[in-house]
Amino acid sequence: MTIRYPNGKKYEPVQQQITSKNKNFSFSNRGKTLEEELNESNEFYLSRSIAVIHKKPVPIQIVHVKYPVRSAAVITEAYFRSPSTTDFNGVWKGKYIDFEAKETTSRTSFPLNNIHDHQVEHMKKVTEHDGIAFLIVKFTSLERYFIVPYDYFEEKWERKIAGGRKSITLKEIEDMSIEIEAGFNPRLDYLAALEHLLQSPIKERIERQENE
Amino acid sequence: MTIRYPNGKKYEPVQQQITSKNKNFSFSNRGKTLEEELNESNEFYLSRSIAVIHKKPVPIQIVHVKYPVRSAAVITEAYFRSPSTTDFNGVWKGKYIDFEAKETTSRTSFPLNNIHDHQVEHMKKVTEHDGIAFLIVKFTSLERYFIVPYDYFEEKWERKIAGGRKSITLKEIEDMSIEIEAGFNPRLDYLAALEHLLQSPIKERIERQENE
């Protein structure tokens, strides 16, 4: 089945072939992975000249390549490497955007064990250089999506490092993140959510609520 | 041989294994590819908190993966895909930086045939969104390095599209680019050259020269 974006470009899934649970395609968006939803949203942003944001290729350590006569080079031995940066980056309104996308099947909390140390380090550095770093977290069972700003994530990461809980509860995420509404086109308008976040930073919002 | 960066991190070449001409390592920088030189420079920038710029992984289409018991997944069939974006991107002083690195063995001109249409399209879009897009061109035989700003490159690309010459002459590059001085650490201080370029855009420089 050939899937095409609205701009006619063929959709070429890469990751998909290597994970087994993505196979339950349906005509709803239910079967789609967060990565697919974000790729579609990014294609939309690109086609409407809203932003230029791409998923980075999966890092691979190539060991052997064959060069059959008259055909394309074939990689015959390679290994997945752990990424030293995040999944997505690009430019939006002159700003550098950098984020990691993660799904969880949990209904109550987001486990921190599938974020790598060097990814956190990367997001920290991006923030120091005035880039905008965040996580997009999908609670698949709840079909809810959140932008978790890096500054907030850092607190919870440090809590874990200090021996505290190894996850962020849904309640904490609800309080300190911006929820992204899922729609049709773009599927996930995360830049609209981010705009909202930048106009009204969460910490200021909470301070206002406390003062009221 | 294990090569380590000044920060102690192991250097893991990826591209290197798949091209044959990179094998002539020597203790000078002569044997290094432009990609290696830029990776080293980026490691330097990262370690000194100057910028967060990384090379993107090579895009691969994975077809078969084996999961041997008790060992890492092995990719047993995969193909190189043509990149839809440029090689390097990141953030520097809050600005989005995006560039493609190309070498040529020619002593007189930079051929345009190894730049893909969609890479040019990508750089155009980055520029439209107020990112900074450029090429870094190395004349390997001359050991000279240039930052070619996208705006200037675009003119020459359009000349090619219109049926004109399929390369940019070294003279044209000398006139319209900033030369990067090769050094030790960082090997290629391309951000210093870029800073210079941003402070004194080439077109203004040329206008000034014409008015003098």
Image (tube, coloured by chain):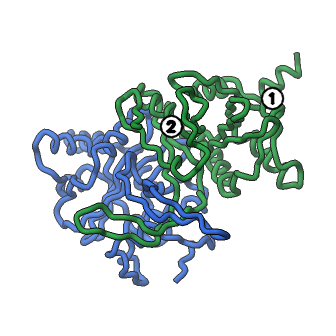
Chain colours: A green, B blue
Which mark lies nearer to you, 1 or 2? 2
**Which residue is depicted at the point 60% across and 38% down?**
A34
| Position of B80 relative to A88 (above/below) | below
**Which residue is depicted at the point 35% across and 70% down?**
A66
Residue sitting farthest toward the top:
A212
Q: Quadrant of residue B31?
A: bottom left
Across and down, in percent, residue B154 comes to 26, 41
Q: Secondary structure at mark 1?
A: helix
Q: Secondary structure at mark 2?
A: helix
**Which residue is depicted at the point 42% across and 43% down?**
A12
Q: Residues within 10 Å of mark 1 (few under 14, many from 20)?
A: few
Residue wearing tag 2? A39
Residue wearing tag 1? A175
Q: Quadrant of residue B111?
A: bottom left
Q: Amino acid at mark 2?
A: Asn
Q: Compute the Cα span from label 1 to label 2.
A: 27 Å
Across and down, in percent, residue A64 comes to 43, 72
